[in-house]
Amino acid sequence: MMKKAEATCTPGAAHQALEPLVGDWNAEVKMWMAPDAPPTITKGTAKSTLTLKGHFVQQEFNGEFMGKPFRGMSFTGYDNVRRNTAASGLTT
């Protein structure tokens, strides 16, 4: 049972596959407010780092939404038990 628990908690190949997400990024965000309207285009930046001993990629995003500052944070990881990728996010 202990070996199974250790294997479940150890980052593996699926976690390594998340590493290309790590870095500093410039974003151009396009939003369509109506199907026939031109998009609203804003700029943003994102910083992604590995966190919690390589289990997750944490991303902090800064940009603009409807003329106001926008800040978001997300976590992306791989669940060794369910064998799938999971993500969650927060905004302010």
Image (tube, grey):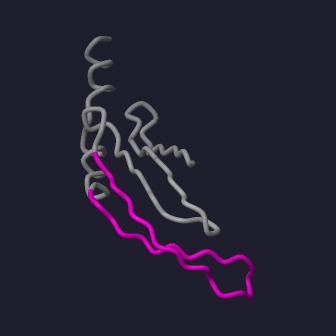
Q: Is residue 56 left or right of residue 29?
A: left
Q: Is residue 76 above or below residue 27?
A: above
Q: Out of 24 and 80, give the one closest to the viewer.
A: 24
Q: Out of 21 and 62, give the one closest to the viewer.
A: 62
The secondary structure that dominates the magenta segment is strand
Q: Is residue 3 above or below residue 64?
A: above
Indicate yes or no whether the magenta region holds residue 37.
yes
Q: Out of 24 and 85, give the one closest to the viewer.
A: 24
The residue that appears at 26% across and 29% down in the rendered structure is 10
Q: Quadrant of residue 5?
A: top left
The residue that appears at 26% across and 38% down in the rendered structure is 54
Give the mark count: 0
Q: Position of residue 25 (x, y in %)?
A: 33, 65
The residue that appears at 39% across and 41% down in the rendered structure is 78
Quadrant where the N terminus sits is top left
Q: Position of residue 90 (x, y in %)?
A: 54, 45
What's the magenta region?
23-49
The residue that appears at 50% across and 53% down in the rendered structure is 71
Q: Is residue 38 left or right of residue 2?
A: right
Q: Position of residue 16 (x, y in %)?
A: 24, 47
Q: Position of residue 50 (x, y in %)?
A: 28, 44
